[in-house]
Amino acid sequence: MLEKRPFSSILGKLVVTKEGKRLGIVKDVTFEARVGELIQLVIKDPTPYTKSLNLEITRDKEVFLPYNSIIAIGDFVVVSEEDLA
């Protein structure tokens, strides 16, 4: 389980796969309001690589990444590509 971090610490960070492929920039998160559980990261400016992944895309061309795919947060938000399928 990831340690707790304020939302502002991941806002605007680049999201990459553990293999180093860029996916986009963190714009927002979605969560279950009743329990406060994070559900997805909202990614703006998705790279063309995101089209090869089976991800939900909004009309505004934003991509939703499942929160459980995050494996590390540091200078980048690192996600496991296997958990995106």
Image: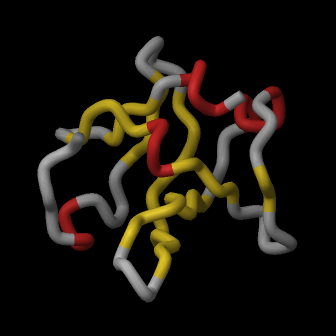
Outermost residue to the right: 59
Q: Is residue 56 above or below residue 18?
A: below
For the C terminus, which image quadrant? top right
Residue found at x 48% / y 37% = 69
Compared across the picture, whether 11 is left or right of 9 comes to right
Left or right: 65, with 14 as reference point: right
Q: Quadrant of the N terminus?
A: top left
Q: Residue at x 64, y 56 (%)?
A: 64
55 or 37: which is nearer to us?
Answer: 37
**Farthest residue toward the bottom?**
34
Q: Is residue 22 above or below residue 42?
A: above
**Relative depth, front residue between 64 and 23:** 64
- Image coordinates of residue 36 in percent, x first then y, are 35, 77
The image's colouring method is secondary structure
In the image, what residue occupies the spot 28% across and 59% down?
10
Which x, y percent locates residue 16? 45, 32
Q: Is residue 39 above or below residue 32?
A: above
x, y (%) of residue 38? 41, 65
In the figure, is residue 69 to the left or right of 1?
A: right
Q: Residue at x 37, y 79 (%)?
A: 35
Question: Of all residues shown, which one is farthest toward the front?
Answer: 35
Badge count: 0
Residue 82: quarter of image? top right
Observer-nearest of 27 and 82:
82
In the displayed image of the protein, which residue is found farthest to the top? 19
User: In the image, residue 31 lies at what x, y percent?
Assistant: 47, 74
